[in-house]
Amino acid sequence: MGSHRSLPSQLAESLPEYLKATELCLQRHKPGGGVLGYPTAALLCIVIDALGGYLSREIIPVRAKVNGRVETRRLRIDKEPFRVLNSRLFNSRHFRLRLSEADIKSVKEYLRNPTVHNAAIQKDHRLFIGDPNGPPFTRRKGLLWVNLPALAARTREAVKRFLAVSEQYVPGSEGERAIESRLPGLEREGRAWSALAAPPRARISTHTSTATTYSKS
């Protein structure tokens, strides 16, 4: 833990720390079997939530039901940070999640909120250890099943891509505003992270060698 002159600099330390903690949780086998799944899920959700806040101005494709028909709409991430799962951070030419708006809300409501706030998940939803190259999310009889190694792998790729362009995306984002709003007024003045000069936004690289798709069963 060090002192930082900018928010992107701090994120370059904090996000890899969250990922390292996630890795340790997945490597820790319990005497009765299984790994530390609940903290793994909570830590990954914290990272995904943060990435969505810093990419709040990105416009991403989302499938939604409109007048009874399923349509793909282009929406800003804005104040729905888990839409970042459909962004270029988590997707590439070889990998597509293609989550619908309902899927994204399910991840937030059935995974992020209960694991972070209640140390639990809703009845019959599942965390499981599957193929790290497989889909992170599947639906089984309408229930959300989360493949933790796959979600961890996709989140590691997303963090790597984000850190390469963070200085272009963080200034003026919802994530930055949330941090600044917690500073006392006199302390906030002149200390905004975005007061540092930021170059033009760069395109997020989506190069990856992993191929998989979002699946339903």
Image (cartoon, helix red, strand yellow):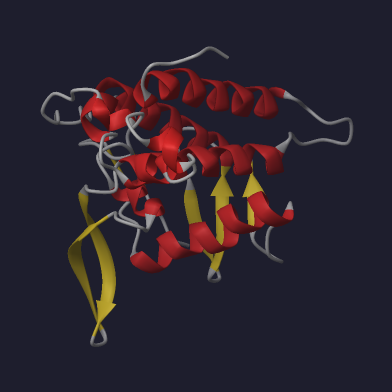
Q: Is residue 120 visible?
A: no
Quarter residue 105 falls in: bottom left
Which residue is drawn at the image coordinates 55% and 63% (left, top)?
109
Q: Is residue 209 left or right of residue 4?
A: left
Q: Quadrant of the N terminus?
A: top right
- In the picture as drawn, the residue positioned furthest to the front comes out as 186
Which residue is drawn at the image coordinates 67% and 54% (left, top)?
117
Quarter residue 145 falls in: bottom right
Quarter residue 197 falls in: top left
- In the picture as drawn, the residue positioned furthest to the bottom comes out as 67
139 vs 4, nearest the viewer = 4
Tell me residue 57's x, y (percent): 22, 48
Which residue is drawn at the image coordinates 14% and 31% (left, top)?
201
112 vs 124, nearest the viewer = 112
Against 121, is 143 above or below? below
Q: Is residue 24 left or right of residue 32?
A: left
Tell me residue 189's x, y (percent): 35, 35
Number of disc labels = 0
Tell me residue 79's x, y (percent): 36, 58
Against 214, is 176 above or below? above
Against 74, is 25 above or below? above
Against 80, is 131 above or below? above
Q: Is residue 22 left or right of residue 165?
A: right
37 vs 9, nearest the viewer = 9
Tell me residue 22's x, y (percent): 61, 29
- In the picture as drawn, the residue positioned furthest to the left comes out as 200
Q: Is residue 140 visible?
A: yes
